[in-house]
Image (cartoon, rainbow, N blue to C red):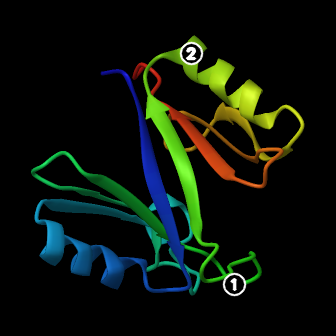
Amino acid sequence: MTASMTPYLTFRGGAREALDRYREIFGGTVVISTFGEFGMADTPLADQVMHGQLEAPNGFVLMASDVPDGMDHTPGNSISVCLSGSELEELRGFFAGLAEGGTVSTPLEKQMWGDEYGACVDRFGVPWMVNIALPKE
């Protein structure tokens, strides 16, 4: 499979604890990248989760991150749907379709981690993220 759809939960400083708890429940492996690992080492965000992912033995995947102060975070409305994979044109098309009539918060473009990424809220108010794994140079 080259494309997948994954729930992405957001927290106000509790992403690491939540991912650890979900690992206790579902099993599997948690991989975490912090804000500090991506250029924010000298900030209060340094140890918070920029991106975390749980992969359970049964195939469940759950992603999560901490939301920095100043960004909107409303518990209960703290989920986005993440499309990811390596099918460049297919995923670009999905992003274009989802963004049509909606609001793009992050244009789909190459990011510091090497992938192409964009985020939008579709016309129905559903937040979406698209991450395209680009070939490594």
Left or right of residue 104: residue 64: left
Q: Quadrant of the N terminus?
A: top left
Q: Nearer the viewer, residue 63 or 100?
A: 100
Q: Measuring 55% from the left and 50% from the top, which residue is drawn there?
A: 81
Q: Amino acid at mark 1?
A: Asp
Q: Nearer the viewer, residue 51 or 111?
A: 51
Q: Earlier in the sequence, mark 1 or mark 2?
A: 1
Q: Measuring 58% from the left and 57% from the top, which residue is drawn there?
A: 80
Q: Measuring 64% from the left and 21% from the top, which residue is drawn there?
A: 92
Task: Find residue 25 and report its image quarter.
Answer: bottom left
Nearer to us of marks 1 and 2 is: 2
Q: How far from the left and from the top, in percent, is residue 72?
A: 75, 76
State the mark number for residue 90.
2
Residues packed near mark 1 inside 10 Å, few (<14), some (14 to 19) or many (20 plus): few
Q: Residue extending furthest front?
A: 124
Q: How far apart are labels 1 and 2 at the CA level?
A: 34 Å
Q: How far from the left and from the top, in percent, is residue 59?
A: 19, 45
Task: Find residue 136 and report its image quarter.
Answer: top left
Q: Residue extending furthest right?
A: 101
Q: Measuring 56% from the left and 64% from the top, which residue is drawn there?
A: 79
Left or right of residue 87: residue 90: right
- Looking at the image, residue 102 lies above or below residue 127: above
Left or right of residue 131: residue 18: left
Question: Is residue 105 at least partly visible in the picture?
Answer: yes
Count up the numbered dots: 2
Task: Find residue 75 and report its image quarter.
Answer: bottom right
Left or right of residue 102: residue 95: left
Q: Secondary structure at mark 2?
A: helix
Identify the residue position indicated by label 1 in the image. Answer: 69
Q: Amino acid at mark 2?
A: Glu
Q: Secondary structure at mark 1?
A: loop
